[in-house]
Image (spheres, rainbow, N blue to C red):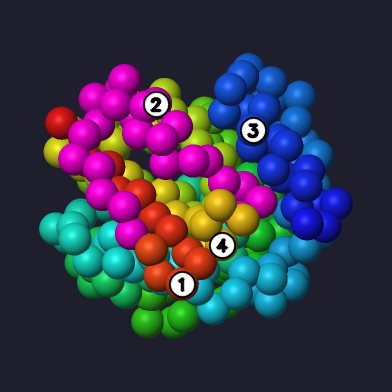
Amino acid sequence: MTRGARFARVVTEVVVRRPFLWRLLRGRLRDMFDAIAPTWETRIGPDHVAALELALAELEPPRRALDLGSGTGVAACAVAERFPGAEVVGVDLAPAMVAEAERTLPAHLAGRVRFEVGDASALGFGDGAFALVTLANMIPFFDELARVTAPGGAIVFSFSRGAGTPIYVAPERLRRELGRRGFAEFAAFSAGPATALLARRR
């Protein structure tokens, strides 16, 4: 791993165990992703959303979907392409990533997909606002995820290089944390090195 990738891995491991430490680390992580935003899509590889797309194929079309850690918008656009009737909101901590996502958004998705800067640990959306939440290579904040996911809704976590992804959380941990918050019916997917976990809220 590069130094940046190692830093992202350490931040992920620390924050998943001790979410209150996020406020001390988020600035450095934001700055790192701001710096690499112009070259991000050359780094993520061809399988970035392959497992995510397999998981999406198992779902009924949502009316509203949220993509957290949206980066340059690749996963948000995959959701919008899969579900032509859905409104999709992409949120990312790094303003440069959001600017890149807006710049590269395909014209045919512009009416249904929007991006905004935000912190996934404290989202500006109402309770149960989204029937679908996706996270591609993103640190999960479990309480906030549960809050914004509608009853009967779903979360899909995906990791473009499986366990080798710098920002990675093991499926056992995801199942345990989500199970405590009312999620069940877990399903795992893989496509090349990419992996995904689907969880449905009761």
Q: Amino acid at mark 2?
A: Glu
71 displayed left or right of 7? left
Q: Residues within 10 Å of mark 4 (few under 14, many from 20)?
A: many
Which residue position holds label 4?
Answer: 161
Which residue position holds label 2?
Answer: 177
Frontmost residue, 121 versus 47: 47
- Mark 2 lies on a secondary structure that is helix
Which residue position holds label 1?
Answer: 192
1 or 3: tag closer to the N-terminus: 3
2 or 4: tag closer to the N-terminus: 4
Q: Is residue 26 above or below residue 43?
A: above
Q: Which residues are magenta?
A: 165-189
Q: Amino acid at mark 3?
A: Glu
Q: Residues within 10 Å of mark 1 (few under 14, many from 20)?
A: few
Q: Residue at x 56, y 52 (%)?
A: 163
1 or 4: tag closer to the N-terminus: 4
Q: Residue at x 81, y 52 (%)?
A: 4
2 or 3: tag closer to the N-terminus: 3
| Image location (x, y in percent) of residue 105 | 51, 75
Asked if the stretch drawn in magenta spans residue 143, the answer is no
Which residue position holds label 3?
Answer: 13
Asked if the stretch drawn in magenta spans residue 185, the answer is yes
Q: Residue at x 62, y 47 (%)?
A: 167
